[in-house]
Structure formats: structure tokens, C-alpha cells
Image (cartoon, rainbow, N blue to C red):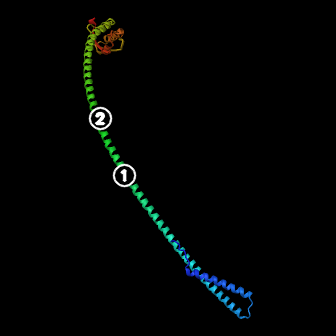
Amino acid sequence: MARRRFRKSPGSLKAWVLTIALHLVVIGLLVIAFRWPGPSGDNTQVIDAVVVEDQQAKQRKAEAARKKAETRKKHEAEKRRKAEAARKRAEAERQRAEVKRKRVAEERKRKHAKEQKRLEEQRRLEEEKQRLVEERQRLEEEKQHLEAERQRAEAERKRKEVEEQLAAAMAAEERERQEQARRARALTATEKYKALIRQKVSRNWARPPGTEEGLQCMVRVRLVPGGEVLQVKIISSSGDKAFDRSVENAVHKASPLPLPEEQELFEYFREIKFLFNPEDR
């Protein structure tokens, strides 16, 4: 609240002028009274009365001025109090407005942040949705690719399986053919070499004294590569132990026995059986 300034009214100014003029007149009379001797004591009484009246007037004016100054001070103090109260109310109002403004700004900021968060979340969800769609498409394409690869692998496996079966069948047929040929050769070689073995055993055999004519026995011989005799056993006796022992001794004496040169035919000569008959020499 603006402070109002007191302006002196024209009447007050005129009263002050008259007061000053009166004071000057009184002072002049006093000077004349002191310097100018009078003929009697009446003049002194008049001057004293004027001086007393002048002092009373001055006191009344001073009292009035003091009261007026006090009133003015009270009025000014009241104006200052009202101005301070108004300033405080304005400050409080400004603070409340500032608090409200800040609260509104914070609320607006919060709503803006919330909206931004919502938009960001929506954008993230859209991106996630798009990513899932792309991932689903990629997985579908990968699934189709894997299915195509599986079908190609399955076709290749079946083709290889057919080829392997065909190759195995051909190999088995070839092995069977070779086995048959080897068996044929082994059978031929077996008969041939059994005859040679019987001849060599017969050459190393000596008839025990006192044995009868016409005796024979079945012999089983185990060999090692090279024809060396590993074991001899009579599996069908002649009935004459001396004859049987003589045949065993003859087989050991005939070691190494004749065998085919083909190593693959040795399996057929690892263990051989033949009938030893001295009459076949």
C-alpha cells in the first residue's frame, strides 16, 4: 500500500505566518520596553501580561503541534503496519501462488512424464510385437528350411541306404562267389593235400611187430602256419593201441606236413581229419 504524504492546508500556513509575526511584534515590544524608560509601572504590567499571554499561546501551540505530531506518527505507524501487513499478505499470496505454480508445474511434469512413459511403453510393446512377428517369421522360415533340409537328408539317406544295400548285396554276392570259389579250391586242395599228407605220414610209419593186416584209424591233426604239427589225436581207434601209437608217431615224424601256398586256404588246414590205412600207400 502506498504511503500518503500530508500536505499543509492554506489555513494552517496562514496561522503559522501570523504566529511568527506576532512573535516578532512581542520581541520588538520587549526590546523597546527594556530600552525605553516609562513614566510609571502600568506599562510594565501590560508588557508582563502580553508576555504571559504569548507564552501560554506558545505552549498551547506547542502542545497542539506535539499532539499533531503524535497523531501523525500514529497515523504513519498505522500506515506502516497496514503496509507491512499488506506486504506480508502479498508475500504470503505470492508464496501460495508460487507453491501452486510449482505444484501445477510438477503435476504437469508428472503427467507429461507419465504420458511419455506410456508412449515409451507403447512403443516398446509395438517394437516387441514387431520383433515377435519377425522372430515368428524367422522361425517359420527356419522350420521350412530345416524341413527341406530334413527331406533332402532323408532322400539322401534313403539313396545312400539303397546304394549301400545294393553295394552290400553285390559285395555279399561277390564274397559268396569268392567263398564258393575258395571252397571249391579248398575242397580240391584238401583232397589233394590230404593225399599228400597221408603219403608223407605213410612214409614215416613203421608197422609195429605183431600187428594184423588191414588195420586203420581216423586221425585228427592240428597244425600251425607252415605245416608244423601242434597236436595229434586218434578219434576213431583201430582197436590196436600199438597201431594207433605208431600212427601218431608217424604224424609227428612227418611234420611239417605239406600245405597249400595260399595263406587264405590255411583255415581249411588248421585242423584236418583223415583216415590212415597202410594199404593205401
Residue at position x 31%, y 43% in the image:
133
Residue behind mark 2: 145
Query: What amino acid does circle 1 point to?
Result: Leu
Return the disc, 1 or 2, that comes first in the chain's sequence: 1
Identify the disc placed on residue 161. Answer: none
Q: Is residue 32 left or right of residue 151?
A: right
Relative vertical location of residue 131 with respect to residue 115 in this rendering, above or below: above
Within the image, what quadrant is residue 139 found in? Answer: top left
Q: Which of 221 and 11 is in front in this view?
A: 11
Q: Which of 171 and 19 is in front in this view?
A: 19
Residue behind mark 1: 119
Q: Is residue 25 left or right of residue 219?
A: right
Q: Which of 161 and 147 is in front in this view?
A: 147
Across and down, in percent, residue 225 comes to 36, 13
Relative vertical location of residue 145 with respect to residue 107 in this rendering, above or below: above
Within the image, what quadrant is residue 67 found in? Answer: bottom right
Relative vertical location of residue 150 with respect to residue 176 in this rendering, above or below: below
Provide the secondary structure element on which disc 1 rests: helix
Provide the secondary structure element on which disc 2 rests: helix
Q: Is residue 65 left or right of residue 170?
A: right
Relative vertical location of residue 9 with respect to residue 119 in this rendering, above or below: below
Within the image, what quadrant is residue 181 found in? Answer: top left
